[in-house]
Amino acid sequence: MGKTSGCAACRDGQGLGFPISMAFQPIVNLSAGTVFAHEALVRGTAGESAGSLLNKLNKDNLYPFDQACRITALEWAAKLQVPAMVSINFMPNAVYKPETCIRATLEAAERFNFPLERIIFEVTEQEQVLDIDHLTSILRAYRKQGFMTAIDDFGAGYAGLNLLADFQPDLIKLDMHLIRNIDQDSVRQTLVEATLQMCRKLNIRVIAEGIESRGELHALRDMGVELFQGYLLAKPGFESLPEVNWPT
């Protein structure tokens, strides 16, 4: 693979100005009793929260931060020998041209010997998307490369029907506000059931994230959801793969 080209500010995360590390949180398939994927979540090197790092971002370091997150996620996934898919968040406003900005990721996967077919690119919820057409062009370019794609926080903000009309990802994550206390809320049940029916017709798999109670989990499982993520099952493990608390 040739030398990475493109913007020198974002290549290999150069110019970030502060170190980062990763935590990993499993996404489990309850029907199969397996871990489907691990989401890579940015942290400081002493375990500082993602929020503390995001507060350091500005227009000058947004691009190297996005690149550094991708590369660090793959580095730690390889170190930990992640046996499942790895979901890597990306910041669409930090991507100039997807074909160019993906090259450092491809090179990192090759360097760390991590299989490309086990990478999911997930649109992060950390920023408002400024250009939906640009976002869909990024997602299409990633799919063309063979990566799976996911849209986070579906049902909140930009991640809604307009985006889904233009691009159908492999996965969507239901916004946690939609599923909070869903076992006690008939309105939320109706909205989620309609979303699940739509996704089945579009061949999109659904992840219920932010699961905190057995009631939420059982209600969603009864609706046909198979993929779950949340503190009830496992909290993120800093530089580690946490054990899953499988429900009985």
Image (cartoon, rainbow, N blue to C red):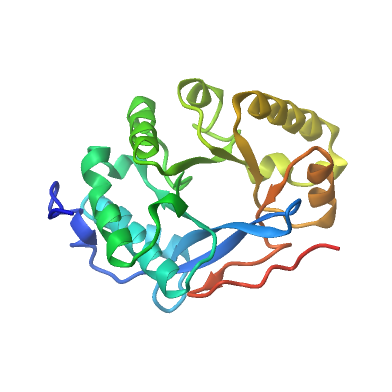
Position of the C terminus, as image quadrant, is bottom right
Q: Is residue 21 visible?
A: no
User: Which is nearer the eye, 103 or 96?
Assistant: 103
Please state the horizontal and vertical placement of residue 181, each as a whole percent of the image. Answer: 80, 46
Does residue 146 appear to the left or right of 105 in the view shown? right
Point out residue 64 in the picture as x, y percentages from the top left corner: 24, 56
Q: Quadrant of the N terminus?
A: bottom left
Residue 142 pos. (x, y %): 36, 39
- In this rendering, the answer to whether 57 lies above or below 91 is below
Q: Is residue 99 above or below residue 71?
A: above
Residue found 13% across the figure and 53% down from its top: 2
Left or right side of 120 for 231? right
Name the residue located 47 percent from the left edge and 41 percent from the top edge.
149
Report the number of discs.
0
Is 221 on the left-hand or right-hand side of 64?
right
Quarter holding residue 48? bottom left
**Direction bottom: furthest residue:** 46
The answer to whether residue 128 is left or right of residue 5 is right
Q: Pick whichever, 22 or 144, lies toward us.
A: 144
Q: Residue at x 74, y 29 (%)?
A: 191
**Foreground: 122 or 105?**
105
| Residue 162 in view | yes
Residue 216 rendering spot, x and y as whole percentages: 80, 49
Residue shown at 23% from the left, 49% from the top? 103
